Image (cartoon, rainbow, N blue to C red):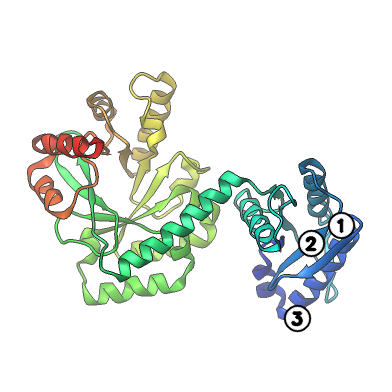
């Protein structure tokens, strides 16, 4: 399976007629670069299906796919324009990845998705583990939709605790609808940020409830934000202008730098749990987290440490002036009634509740 990278941008820049000619030029380039005994078929939109005979091993299959990718180093000619284009390729082999056309097609599409995730303009062979992960994700989406439609979805809330006095300063919600006590943060996906209707939705909700930003915070993962920061920065700015508190989630797990972060209209940064896990013993981890906290404060950002599980971690983070902590030390994600108790009593008085929650989870 082959896909033209960012083909929509070509349509936007040159028009659909030029885009159609570019697809024709792409097909010609693919036929010229493909191995012998092959069949190239359109697969809808800007995708193609290439069937090659006589290649049954991983190494030659990937080499052939990479040859297709490399064929687009030179620009294509469309409507008198010299246009640089690239492709991503997903590869599946029979009988290794299946005998039936449907199973091979699904495997090749899985490889294509992985090529896109890897940054485009590359080829990826189907990986059974990745395929199983994608299948579990698709099943989870279906189960979530059924639960939502059936009214079986319940909200749980994981507290955010101010480290210097143990006060509960907010929650992260694992759901959609919110409660009206401490601020609750909800995760916003890159798909929602790409959809202009999401901004309009926030504007409509704000018109009905002007105090909404006081108790609803928005979290965007660093990896999603770093991929499309140019497109997203304007929308984040609009969300901030509406009054919403914006946090970057899982900082350190992606590719951002502090100088890059300084340009973004955000209020807080959440340190990824992978950096907190080794504290306070890991000296390298100490240096990294200490630098994150210091730089974030220089930028005027609040800092939240994720995955706090021990008293020693909390004490070290407090000494380093980390503002908030979130993790199993304080509480797991709690159902509404227990979350309300936590909000009233604070972390120190509710640690027994967290211990009960942890004990119940292990049982």
Q: Quadrant of residue 183?
A: bottom left
Query: In what quadrant of the picture does the N terminus appear?
Result: bottom right
Mark number displayed over residue 1: none
| Residue 219 percent across, percent down from the top left | 36, 54
In-image side of 255 versus 81 (left or right): left
- Residue under the image location 23 percent in, 77 percent down: 208
Return the x and y of residue 178 as percentages of the image width and height: 22, 62
Report which quarter residue 328 is drawn in: top left
- The answer to whether 110 appears left or right of 182 in the picture is right
Gap in Å between the C-alphas at discs 2 and 1? 8 Å
Farthest residue in the bottom direction? Answer: 17
Residue 300, how many percent across, how many down? 33, 44
Cα distance between the residues tagged 3 and 2:
24 Å
Of labels 3 and 2, earlier in sequence is 3
Q: Nearer the viewer, mark 1 or mark 3?
A: 1
- Badge 1 crowding class, 10 Å Cα cut-off, few under 14, some 14 to 19, many 20 or more, is some
The residue that appears at 74% across and 75% down in the rendered structure is 19
With 275 as the anchor, is 209 left or right in this view? left
Q: Earlier in the sequence, mark 2 or mark 1?
A: 1
Are the residues at dot 2 and dot 1 in contact (C-beta closer than 8 Å)?
yes
Residue 239 lies, in percent from the top left, at 36, 64
Q: Is residue 229 above or below residue 208?
A: above
Residue 72, above or below 291: below
Residue at 39% from the left image edge and 70% from the top image edge: 199
Q: Which mark is residue 50?
A: 2
In whole angstroms, how far apart are the C-alphas of marks 1 and 3?
A: 26 Å
Mark 3 highlights which residue?
A: 17
Pointer 1 or 3: first along the chain? 3
Above or below, 318 against 256 in this view is above
Question: SS class of the residue under badge 2?
Answer: strand
Q: Secondary structure at mark 3?
A: helix
Which residue in the protein does label 1 denote?
34
């Amino acid at each position: 399976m082959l896909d033209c990278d960012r083909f929509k941008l070509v349509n936007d820049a040159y028009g659909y007629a030029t885009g159609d000619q570019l697809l024709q030029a792409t097909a010609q380039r693919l036929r010229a670069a493909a191995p012998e005994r092959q069949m190239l078929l359109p697969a809808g939109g800007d995708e193609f299906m290439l069937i090659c005979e006589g290649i049954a091993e991983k190494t030659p299959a990937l080499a052939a796919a990479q040859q297709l990718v490399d064929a687009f180093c030179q620009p294509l000619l469309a409507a008198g324009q010299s246009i640089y284009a690239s492709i991503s390729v997903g590869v599946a082999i029979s009988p290794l990845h299946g005998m039936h056309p449907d199973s091979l097609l699904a495997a090749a599409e899985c490889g294509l998705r992985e090529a896109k995730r890897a940054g485009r303009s590359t080829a990826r062979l189907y990986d059974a583990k990745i395929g199983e992960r994608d299948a579990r994700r698709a099943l989870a989406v279906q189960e979530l939709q059924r639960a939502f439609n059936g009214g079986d979805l319940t909200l749980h809330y994981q507290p955010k605790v101010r480290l210097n006095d143990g006060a509960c300063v907010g929650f992260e919600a694992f759901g959609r609808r919110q409660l009206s006590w401490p601020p609750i943060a909800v995760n916003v996906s890159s798909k929602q940020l790409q959809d202009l209707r999401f901004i309009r939705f926030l504007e409509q909700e704000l018109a009905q409830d002007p105090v909404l930003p006081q108790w609803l915070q928005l979290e965007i993962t660093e990896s999603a934000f770093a991929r499309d920061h140019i497109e997203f920065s304007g929308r984040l700015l609009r969300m901030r202008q509406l009054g919403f508190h914006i946090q970057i989630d899982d900082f350190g797990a992606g590719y951002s730098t502090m100088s890059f972060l300084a340009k973004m209209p955000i209020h807080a940064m959440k340190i990824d749990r992978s950096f907190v896990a080794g504290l306070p013993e890991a000296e390298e981890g100490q240096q990294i987290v200490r630098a994150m906290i210091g730089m974030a404060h220089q930028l005027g950002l609040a800092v939240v440490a994720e995955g706090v599980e021990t008293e020693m971690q909390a004490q070290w983070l407090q000494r380093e002036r980390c503002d908030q902590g979130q993790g199993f030390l304080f509480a797991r994600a709690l159902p509404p009634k227990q979350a309300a108790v936590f909000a009233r009593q604070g972390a120190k008085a509710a640690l027994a509740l967290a211990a009960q929650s942890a004990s119940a989870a292990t049982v």
